[in-house]
Amino acid sequence: MNNRYKKAESLRKKGLSYREISDRLNIPKSTISYWFRDKQWSQDVRRRLSRRKAKIDVERVIAMNKAREKKRKKLYKDYRAQAYEAFNKYKNNKLFISGLMLYWAEGDSKLENSLVRLSNTDPRIINIFIEFLKKFLDIDEKKIKLSLVIYPDLDDGYCKKFWFKKTGLPLDNFIKSQVIIGRHPTRRLKYGICTVYNCSRESKEKIMKWIDMCAEDIMRE
């Protein structure tokens, strides 16, 4: 008993944790804790170990974040490379160019939010963009969402039915409408403003790359 205690004490003073001492000497961790719980020098060791662990944990988190960021950047680069390869294949397609021009003019251009989002009051524009998403970005129809911005005097259900008939997308694809107070008490937009959106960094990277390439092509002509 005395010999085992001295060995444990020696290891503890060298800065080993209770778990490490237990593994080395085959002594229950609870026993080691009981031996040294009232020893001030052992509490000092515990604090040093806690600080060291906290530092290691921080360094590990930083390393993991750097690794994830590196992986993300590579993935985004791969998306742009795929877009580059696909551009020549699609650039003479009217639907492709129409979808890009619409997004260039009306779409959400903030890359970091990963939202592919376009708003308009014209069902033809909305439909062209929906077809663009399905054909060139291979987005499943179920993942294409619609939301409406309407005035208080418009009936939400009536407006949704209108856009449902015009787009052919299921009513399940519609999310909660946003009601806004306009400058005038009477409605100006009979069916509200429709927003098509899909959350996909891959699609956003490709669209923005295609727009850049399209602009370059136009400027060269």
Image (tube, rainbow, N blue to C red):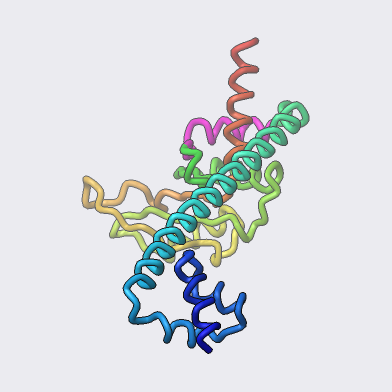
Q: Quadrant of the C terminus?
A: top right
Of all residues, the one furthest to the top in this rendering is 221
Of all residues, the one furthest to the right in this rendering is 89
Residue shown at the point (46%, 38%) measured from the top left:
110
Classified by dominant secondary structure, the portion drawn in magenta counts as helix
Residue 196 x %, y %:
52, 49
Name which quarter of the figure residue 148 lies in: bottom left
| Closer to us: 142 or 7 | 7
Q: Left or right: where does residue 85 sit relative to residue 110?
A: right
Q: What's the magenta region?
A: 94-109
Residue 195 x %, y %:
47, 49
Q: Left or right: where does residue 33 sit relative to residue 116?
A: left
Q: Left or right: where does residue 96 sit relative to residue 85?
A: left
Residue 220 x %, y %:
64, 11
Name which quarter of the figure residue 58 lies in: bottom left
Q: How many marks?
A: 0
Residue shown at the point (43%, 64%) measured from the top left:
49
Asked whether 167 falls inside the magenta stretch, the response is no
The answer to whether residue 176 is above or below residue 219 is below
Residue 214 x %, y %:
63, 23
Asked whether 100 falls inside the magenta stretch, the response is yes
| Closer to us: 32 or 200 | 32
Residue 123 in sight from this viewpoint: no
| Closer to us: 38 or 189 | 38
Residue shown at the point (58%, 55%) measured from the top left:
144
Residue 45 in sight from this viewpoint: yes
